[in-house]
Image (cartoon, rainbow, N blue to C red):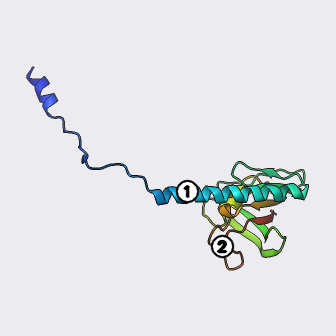
């Protein structure tokens, strides 16, 4: 009986939270989330219109980019997403103005060396392919843009792998 009393008396009391802590709703944060969702929906509908006008068999991914296989051969070697890939690509705006060209870039997956949308798109590619990806701005360079790419610009990447 004495052992039972000792075992129950050694319990530590649980922490108590202050009674004046109430959960508050950050209305600014909610407004920003709703605003971003509206921007995304608007851009997605514009990209859908653009793709439909192309009359080509683009496919939309679950992530949100569009892809069109332009060239392939019978050898299918998926890019290894657990290490690196060597790619070359051209970046165009939707008016098909060339914005940038990059050759033989080594991409280390998971290291944020290319825009998030492009990295996700690369995961769908095989070696020896040329694929055209249409990537919304929120998966590309977003509100910041670059020296050559204005903010909020959806982009077309033509990517090929050696």
Q: Residue 47: x percent and y percent?
A: 78, 58
| Crowd class of label 2 (few under 14; some 14 to 19; many from 20; radius 10 Å) | some
Look at the image and tell me in which quarter the N terminus lies: top left
Q: Residue 120: x percent and y percent?
A: 69, 56
Judge whether residue 20 can be spotted in this image: yes
Look at the image and tell me in which quarter the C terminus lies: bottom right
The residue under label 2 is 145
Q: On residue 33, which mark appears?
A: 1
Is residue 97 shown above or below 133? Answer: below
The answer to whether 28 appears left or right of 78 in the picture is left
Judge whether residue 128 can be spotted in this image: no
Q: Residue at x 79, y 68 (%)?
A: 89
State which quadrant residue 84 falls in. Answer: bottom right
Q: Residue at x 8, y 23 (%)?
A: 2
Outermost residue toward the top in this view: 1
Q: Residue at x 72, y 70 (%)?
A: 105
């Amino acid at each position: 009986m004495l052992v039972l009393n000792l075992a129950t008396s050694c319990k530590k009391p649980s922490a108590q939270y202050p009674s004046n802590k109430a959960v508050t709703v950050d209305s600014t944060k909610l407004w920003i989330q709703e605003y971003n969702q509206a921007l995304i929906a608007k851009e997605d509908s514009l990209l859908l219109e653009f793709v439909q006008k192309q009359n080509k068999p683009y496919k939309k991914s679950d992530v949100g980019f569009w892809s069109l296989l332009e060239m392939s051969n019978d050898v299918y070697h998926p890019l290894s997403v657990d290490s690196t890939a060597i790619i070359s690509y051209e970046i165009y705006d939707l008016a098909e103005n060339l914005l940038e060209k990059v050759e033989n870039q080594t991409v280390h997956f998971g290291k944020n060396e290319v825009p998030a949308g492009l990295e996700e798109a690369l995961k769908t590619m095989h070696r020896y392919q040329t694929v055209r990806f249409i990537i919304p701005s929120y998966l590309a360079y977003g509100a910041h843009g670059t020296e050559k790419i204005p903010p909020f610009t959806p982009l077309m990447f033509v990517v090929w792998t050696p």
